[in-house]
Image (spheres, rainbow, N blue to C red):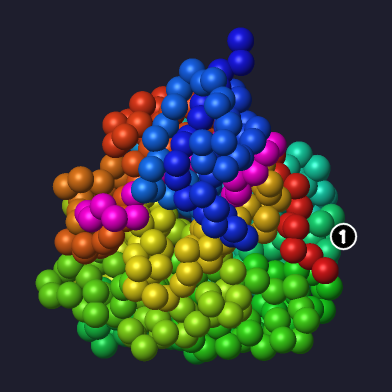
Amino acid sequence: MTKRTVIRGGLVITASDEIHADVLIEDSRIVALAAPGSQHWSADRTVDATGKYVIPGGVDAHTHMELPFGGTFASDTFETGTRAAAWGGTTTIVDFAVQSVGSTLREGLDTWHAKAEGNCAIDYAFHMIVSDVNEETLKEMDLLVEEGVTSFKQFMAYPGVFYSDDGQILRAMQRSARNGGLIMMHAENGIAIDVLVEQALARGETDPRYHGEVRKALLEAEATHRAIRLAQVAGAPLYVVHVSAAEAVAELARARDEGLNVFGETCPQYLFLSTDNLAEPGFEGAKYVCSTPLRPKEHQARLWQGLRTNDLQVVSTDHCPFCFTGQKELGRGDFSKIPNGLPGVENRMDLLHQAVVDGHISRRRWIEIACATPARMFGLYPKKGTITPGADADVVVYDPHAEQVLSAGTHHMNVDYSAYEGRRVTGRVETVLSRGELVVDRRKYTGRAGHGVFTPRSTCQYLT
């Protein structure tokens, strides 16, 4: 028996349109849109969206559930993290499977499949972190593209952990140029940063704020420039993750003006937080240690500008939570030992709606950078990221007038603090459907672990 859901009376917002429409869902797919009240569809379930927005479920293309880092693990499991994502209006995540040095890509991918399978409340996909470039790894990249893991992350940072040198990066880029994959780059000069870390600690500069001071904006810009030119030599596309510095945005803008297939992502923490947070008294600044680091507030205007001019295309979270008690505290007396990462998968859609309220971006741009473009960038569109016949029924009813205060006391992420504690925002998720199933129903959680399934991806849909 076909199960029918009708969402009535809302303003449907996609990256390209805003229309008042009723939405008909059959089982897991959207099948029709019609002028409000013009179709008397019979339905098993009717959702009243009068006075609300009806938007595609968010696509967060950068999360780290259960990531091992700095002697501990990210505190959100795939179960808790995807439940929190759903509460925040995100219905698809793309997480990172990790290749350990000395292991194969397949071993890393299988490990992450085992972590996620049967545990997720929403659909998920994987990127592959490539930590050990060799002939076998390069061959495996081709096989992963064929099975829907079509993007590969490399690091110019973290020597001795994830780091790849320029030769390894070039080889992987050359391979992706042939197999259609997309190289994602953590662009910071990790070799130089390690020198500055050592020197700062020798001077007795151990507080969290020095994490931001040693990871200089110029070293992000230099690595971004180098990654762009290596990609140009390889004839490969490039996606630079978590761009935080105005100087790095300038490198991306220059490359795009030259017609290169270069793309950039930023995150809410760089748009809403700053080095003021890293410098909070006592050890409080440890809550805000992430890499790339938070920057001085003056960088924010350039990031917003980049989002408006499409020099930056995507806002993801880089969700990688560590509890303040027992995890961030590993770095007391040595900022270099603070696990790098912030919680945010639940807050992204709301913070970006606040950006609409504040006049930074339009409503359609909100949906573009949070839903449609990440889906296109990583081969999920139009299955994900839009509201159109044939798309998965990943739909959010969003109340643009509700006010809320972000807080660890009310969030659903498995972490003991909020990076946005006490921040008042306008707009809140009311109801969430994932493939036609209610996950959040009028602010009550009705989802379940195991509803979310692995979603193979095609290649990037933006390549010229």
Res 148 → quadrant: top right
Work out whether residue 253 can be spotted.
yes
Image height check: is 167 above or below 326? below
- Measuring 63% from the left and 81% from the top, which residue is drawn there? 252
Q: Position of residue 60 (x, y in %)?
A: 51, 52
Residue 343 horizontal/vertical position (percent): 34, 55
Whether residue 389 appears in magenta in the rendering, the answer is yes
Name the quadrant of the C terminus.
Answer: bottom right
> Which range is magenta?
384-404
On whether residue 394 falls in the magenta region, the answer is yes
Drawn side of residue 301 relative to residue 26, left or right:
left
**Does residue 92 appear to the left or right of 164 in the view shown?**
left
Q: Is residue 371 left or right of residue 102?
A: left
Q: Residue at x 34, y 41 (%)?
A: 430
Which residue does the image show at 61% across and 40% down from the upper left?
A: 33
Q: Residue furthest left?
A: 282
Q: Which residue is mark 1?
A: 178
Q: Amino acid at mark 1?
A: Arg
